[in-house]
Amino acid sequence: NKTSIMFRKFSCFILLCCFSCCVFAQKNIKKKPKKSSPQVVYSLPKTMFAIEVNMKKTETRVGPYFRYCERYLAIRDVCTEDNVSYEVQSLNIKTLPVPDKDKTFQINAMSALWVNEIGVICGLNIPPMIAEETAKVQVSNEAYLDKFAFDYRAYYEDQLLANSIAKMAESAAKQIYSIRESRMALISGDNERVPADGQSLQIMLEELDKAEQSLMELFVGKKVVTTETYTYYYTPSNKSTKDEVIFRVSPTAGVVEKDDLSGLPVYLTISANKNDIPPVDLKNGGELFYNIVGTAFVQLKVENQMMFEQTMSIAQMGTLQALPSKFKTYKLRFDPNT
């Protein structure tokens, strides 16, 4: 009947569709790719300069009684406002290795190829040298702030309880003159309490000097001299350079950027030494590459004053070389700095 004929046709259609799907699926099955050899990426080092600038920093704080200095002590030339000044003491260059992006390579993995934490090659079939950790020096800010605290310990109780700045200044001035009289009496021997031995006398005079200085600072101001070290990072190219302004030093702000004309220019000159060794052809990518380090004469000067001169090793000024094809049998240690 018609129903059975329709059912047979539908069943044949379903079977045909299933067969077509199976054939299509078989045609699209791809073979599993072969496992490629594991690769190791390594970089050769590039030299970065860490330029250390040691500066003398002089800070002056106004004394609380500076307005009464001429009246009570007959001193006119005193500090009337806080100020800071800087002076360059020395310049020094230390070198640091960084990965050279232009000399980064890929090679078949070998368990004996060592790279350090920044990806620079440092050993083949031999463990790298372990660098000793350097101690970190911390400066206490609390001790630094104490240097600017004015000392009132030479005051008597009634002087500390004075009800006006003018009265306190007058009392401090009287105390200064009293200390000077006591010192003179000790030196001349007029004081009944002059110690018998010279060491005790010296200690008494030193204590009087300290007391007078702390009181004088209340009038003339307090000066603190410290040394600050700035570090400026600079990466040379592979070519020489002459009198390049890399940063400036300001007498009021310390190290500033090179476009800040308030500071004196710091000039860098790099004179590369001649290297006659030709570089290797990079087309042979299966080799293991390394640097033959270059050298250069480096100079730093502030305006016209020469501050640093030294011949230095600079990795990027050398030439690229490759080990022979049997390098896997070698034991080599590379300098991760160059």
Image: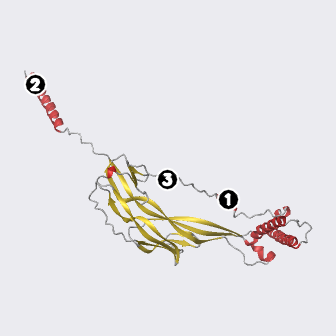
Residue 314 at least partly seen: yes
Label 3 Cα neighbours within 10 Å, binned few <14 / some 14-19 / many ≥20: few
Residue 240, relative to residue 131: is it above or below?
Answer: below
Instruction: Quadrant for the N terminus, please.
Output: top left
Q: Give coordinates of residue 258: x percent, y percent.
A: 48, 71
Disc 3 target residue: 131
Q: What element carries label 2?
A: helix
Q: Is 249 placed above or below 292 here?
A: below
In the image as oriented, which residue stretches furthest toward the right? 192
Q: How many labels sit on residues?
A: 3
Q: Report the residue at 84% width, 72% height from top.
A: 180
Where residue 29 sits, quadrant-wise, is top left
Q: Residue 143 carries which label?
A: 1
| Amino acid type of the residue that numbered disc 1 sits on in the rendered structure | Ala
Q: Is residue 40 toward the left or the right of residue 157 in the image? A: left
Q: In which quarter of the image is residue 203?
A: bottom right
- The residue under label 2 is which amino acid type? Arg
How packed mark 2 is, by other alpha carbons closer than 10 Å (few <14, some 14-19, many 20 or more), is few
Viewer-side residue, 138 vs 202: 202
N-term mark: 1 or 3: 3
Q: What element carries label 1?
A: helix
Q: What's the residue type where badge 3 is placed? A: Ala
Percent x, y for residue 51?
50, 66
In the foreground, 16 or 75: 75
- Mark 2 lies on residue: 8
